[in-house]
Image (spheres, rainbow, N blue to C red):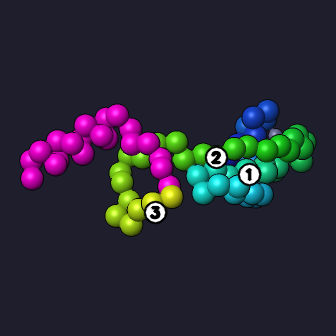
Amino acid sequence: MRITCPHCLERAITRTSKRPVPVFYEVYAQCANPDCGWGGKLHVEFVTTRSPSRRPNPNINIPVEPRARQALLAQLEDE
Ligand SMILES: [Zn+2]
């Protein structure tokens, strides 16, 4: 995933700082443009499931996208 600086749109260098829960990351970003110098934090979160895991972790609950849910239900009906 390429992250660019929100100000100058140059490449930003990222470093994960924390993962307080398995579906959520805090990431520090630093603009690589020395003339800009912006640095900050972003959040990355797994919000929906498009394709279910074949090795599901029972502690993880990421909602299935409505469209993906319809496709899965259709597959079950075909079987
Ligand atoms: Zn910048």
Image mark for residue 57: 3
Q: In this rendering, would 41 be left or right of 58?
A: right
Label 2 sits on residue: 44
Q: Are marks 1 and 2 in contact (CB under 8 Å)?
A: yes
Earlier along the polypeptide chain: callout 3 or callout 2? 2
Q: Quadrant of ligand 1?
A: top right
Q: In this rendering, would 34 be left or right of 22?
A: right
Earlier along the polypeptide chain: callout 1 or callout 2? 1
Q: Secondary structure at mark 3?
A: loop
Label 1 sits on residue: 27
Image mark for residue 17: none
Task: Say which amino acid is labelled 3.
Answer: Asn
Q: Nearer the viewer, mark 3 or mark 1?
A: 3
Q: Residue at (54%, 47%) from the top-left corner?
A: 46
Task: Say which amino acid is labelled 1.
Answer: Val
**Image position of 11 with respect to 19: above or below:** above
Magenta span of residues: 60-79
Task: Say which amino acid is labelled 2.
Answer: Val
**Image position of 32 with respect to 9: above or below:** below
**Image position of 68 with respect to 13: above or below:** above
Magenta span main SS: helix
Q: Secondary structure at mark 1?
A: strand
